[in-house]
Image (tube, grey):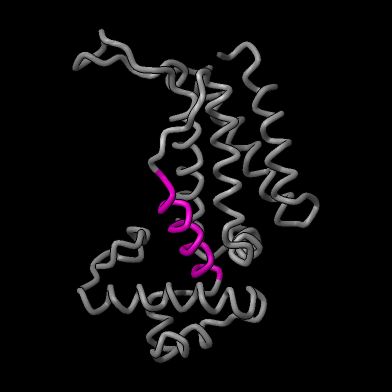
Amino acid sequence: MSSQVTSPALRQGLNARQAETVENLMAAGLEELRAVGHEALTIRTVAQRAGVSPATAYTYLSSKNHLFAELFWRHLSEDGGAAPAGASATERLQATVRALTARIVVEPELAAAVTPALLGSDPDVARLRLRIGGEFYARFEAALAAERRPGGPGGMAGPAGSGGTAGAGVLEVLVLTFTGALLQAGMGLLTYDQIADRLVAAVEVIMRGNE
């Protein structure tokens, strides 16, 4: 399969030819989204661009919302892994929210498509919604964690703030704040630049007394 990231649910049980078809559909879907926008895009037009039948496309994609959620998931996942910069948890979290919003606006049509898509009731979308939320949680958890020190299991101690009620509470508030800001941007109430600035300020408020 391609090195592109695809959710486990979509690639589960696929042979090499089927995996290639999925990759072609994903590439065609992103191209079509860039070309016509999320409202005009249909699974049929994506299938045509990918060179497959609509029936084949629907074998892998239950709806265009499923496509948008899958594209958004892989867009986030492809950018994962870099440790956030900053001497304190607050600085690392602020760097994380800026990096996430900057990543999202790299694909403006996808950013516009994903908010309404993730609000849908499609079971495939629901699974990806949980996975995307988990990705946000993991990014914030990594940023919140203090530097590890000798002394824990295997010579490494667990990250400060990542366990216990207080740490879990902070993480939950961070995720709720971030996803709420994305919803406001998706509704056109704020630009992504504006939510980045406001999220940086929100992180400072949330982290007061929680360092």
Residue at 43% of width from left, 81% of height from top?
Answer: 58
Q: Which residues are magenta?
A: 65-80
Q: Quadrant of residue 32?
A: bottom right
Residue nearer the viewer, 141 or 168: 141
Residue 206 to residue 76: above or below? above
Q: Is residue 41 above or below residue 170?
A: below
Q: In the rendered view, does 192 fall on the left or right side of 160? A: right
Residue at 66% across, 63% down: 112
Position of residue 152 in the picture relative to residue 117 (left or right)? left
Picture residue at 42% right of the left edge, 85% below the top: 50
Spot occupied by residue 181 in the image (x, y as percentages of width and height): 69, 44
- Give the mark count: 0
Q: Would you say 63 lies left or right of 185 here?
A: left
Q: Percent from the top left, x then y, of residue 129?
A: 51, 53
Given the current orientation, which residue lies at the most extreme right position?
189
Comparing 172 with 4, the one in front is 4
Q: Main secondary structure of the magenta part?
A: helix
* Quarter containing the N terminus: bottom left
Magenta region includes residue 77: yes
The quadrant of the image that shows the C terminus is top right
Residue occupying image coordinates x 63% and y 73%: 38
Magenta-span inclusion, residue 192: no
The image quarter in which residue 65 lies: bottom right
Instruction: In the rendered view, tell whether residue 66 sits above or below residue 134.
Output: below
Judged left or right of residue 6, residue 211 is right
* Closest to the observer, 80 or 189: 80
